Amino acid sequence: MRVSVVIPWHRDPDDLGRALASVLVQQGAELEVIVVANGVDDALFAAAGRLTTDPRCRLVRLTTAGASAARNHGMDLATGELIFFLDADDTFLPGKVIAFAAAHLRFPFGAAFSRGLRQRGAGVSWPMPAAQWDEQAPIAEFLFCDGNNISTSALVVSAKAKTALRFDALASPYEDPDLLIQAEAKGLVMQMLPEVLYVWNDARAANRLSRTVDAGARLHWIDSTPANVSARARAAFRARCVAQHVLRRRPWNSLRLILKAWVSGGVSAKETLMFLVRGLLPAPLAARAVDLYLAGKAAARGG
């Protein structure tokens, strides 16, 4: 089987080198690696050229920065039967490509994803999503109602499905759940592999272009998602991905969103308390408390 791996890249040659190394050692399929350098200057583009001399690599350039456009461009160029995505500051773990190739041969999918090892600062890491999707629950409820986060590096789409799916920059930084929501809305077959198959380097999230919390943009996105996103899932997203992050700046609106999610059953009483703690504690303490909470939740589920 021929597979394509699309790597959007914007700034750090060391990151790109590690990402490429993790892909080029993959076995079990014929590899095509497409690096989309987006918004880089000539010096950085030249550096990327020195890293992509392997004949399996292809380097292309977009003039403006933007991971969604870069992923879409790479997907359009891909010639593989399966298309993988890898953020340049993440890495694949051994066996990722062959695991998805085998799953697709057993039961062809339009879109699929796996667990990843989410690495945070101070040596804290845990498998995410903590739970296994049963492929029956609505995907938005799985992702938002219980905090089953994924990274774009988790995603794989089939060549037959690529024309139906687009990464949407307006969904940033939720392009990954947005793509799965699109896939479900279009009736595509989806799978979740239970194995931990990539490393999500979330310790350096501050370096990402999508780091700033734009509450208005996030609320607009969740309100404009298709009908397969339930009211319960929308309420959970508003509390989990918006309200807890802006609680200090917008206390009354944030409290209203958090309580509405709890009343609707979108989040548990324990998580409601965690949102309030995160929103009110000083940032370093809040970050540490959340890391420990999420790591503990993953451990409790056997992750």
Image: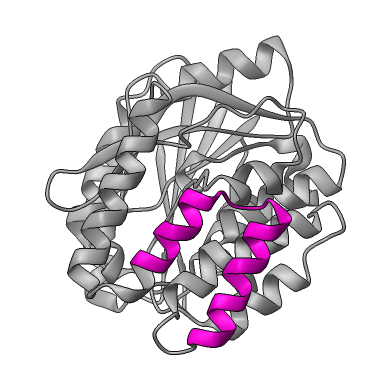
Q: Is residue 274 magenta?
A: yes
Does 256 sit above or below residue 234? below
Task: Place residue 80 in its image quadrant.
Answer: top right
Does 132 sit above or below residue 210? above
The colour scheme applied to this rendered structure is one colour
Residue 244 coordinates in the image, percent (x, y): 46, 70
Q: Residue at x 57, y 68 (%)?
A: 258
Tell whether 223 sits left or right of 155: right
Across the whole image, how many numbered discs are drawn on residues? 0
Q: Is residue 125 visible?
A: yes
Tell whether 194 sits left or right of 234: left
Does 103 sit above or below residue 57? above
Which region shows up in magenta?
Answer: 251-277
Residue 252 coordinates in the image, percent (x, y): 55, 86
Magenta span: chief secondary structure: helix
Residue 2 coordinates in the image, percent (x, y): 57, 25
Front residue of 263/62: it is 263
Residue 183 coordinates in the image, percent (x, y): 76, 45
